[in-house]
């Protein structure tokens, strides 16, 4: 059935529920697992006269801070995968991409045949105002997407 499953997480309580369900499925199928977290682009606030950003995102600490934050999400996820009996698991951090873009690109790069992610299930104006990365992935993914709520 599925041989390589990509599980997307942002470290939230809801995402951890999706992680657990994805890991259970992977363990039952003997599938390889990739776990991805995406650091969206930093909100740019300052520009100089030439239009160049002059803020934190240009500092040497930026990438280190973002990587450290991603590892706080990935390491517990990788530990959970091993505890769930997943034989092969790899963590991925995608820097400076919107979540849907980073998830889809990682799925393509890894050769995933299933994506697992969560959704808050928002509707109407709330969804419009907050956006829906899950809806974007569903619309653009080339492989099946299992959405956990």
Image (cartoon, grey):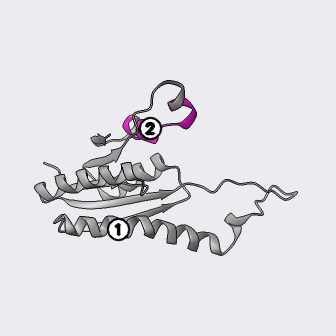
Which residue does the image show at 39% across and 34% down from the upper left?
Answer: 121
Q: Quadrant of the C terminus?
A: top left
Which residue does the image show at 54% across and 26% down from the upper left?
Answer: 125
Q: Nearer the viewer, mark 1 or mark 2?
A: 1
**Eyeballing the image, is 99 above or below 62?**
above
Of callouts 1 and 2, the N-terminal one: 1
Query: Which numbered marker is on residue 35?
Result: none
> Which residue sits furthest top?
124
Q: Secondary structure at mark 2?
A: helix
Q: Secondary structure at mark 1?
A: helix
Image coords of residue 107 (percent x, y): 35, 53
Question: As rendered, which of 108 and 1 lies closer to the eye?
Answer: 1
Magenta stretch, main secondary structure class? helix
Query: Magenta stretch containing residue 3, yes or no?
Result: no
Query: Magenta stretch containing residue 135, yes or no?
Result: yes
Write down the quadrant of residue 84 in the picture.
Answer: bottom left
Image coords of residue 34 (percent x, y): 30, 61
Question: As rendered, which of 19 and 45 lies closer to the eye?
Answer: 19
Mark 1, Cα crowd under 10 Å, few <14 / some 14-19 / many 20+, is few
Mark 2, Cα crowd under 10 Å, few <14 / some 14-19 / many 20+, is some
Disc 2: which residue? 136
Q: Does the image show residue 88?
A: no
Q: Is residue 119 left or right of residue 46?
A: left
Image coords of residue 129 (percent x, y): 57, 33
Write down the quadrant of residue 80 in the picture.
Answer: bottom left
Image coords of residue 146 (percent x, y): 27, 42
Q: Does the image show residue 73?
A: yes
Q: Which residues are magenta?
A: 127-138
Write down the quadrant of residue 41 in the picture.
Answer: bottom right
Question: As rendered, which of 57 and 119 lies closer to the eye?
Answer: 119
Disc 1: which residue? 76
């Amino acid at each position: 059935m599925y041989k390589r499953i990509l599980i997307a997480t942002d470290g939230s309580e809801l995402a951890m529920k999706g992680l657990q369900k994805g890991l259970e499925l992977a363990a039952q199928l003997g599938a390889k697992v990739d776990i991805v977290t995406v650091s969206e682009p930093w909100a740019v606030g300052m520009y100089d006269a030439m239009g160049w950003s002059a803020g934190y995102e240009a500092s040497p600490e930026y990438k280190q801070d973002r990587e450290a934050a991603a590892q706080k999400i990935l390491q517990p996820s990788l530990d959970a995968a091993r505890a769930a009996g997943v034989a092969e698991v790899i963590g991925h951090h995608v820097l400076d991409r919107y979540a849907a873009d980073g998830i889809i690109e990682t799925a393509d790069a890894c050769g995933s045949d299933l994506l697992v992610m969560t959704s808050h299930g928002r509707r109407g104006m709330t969804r419009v105002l907050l956006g829906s990365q899950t809806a974007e992935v569903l619309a653009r993914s080339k492989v099946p997407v299992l959405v956990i709520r």
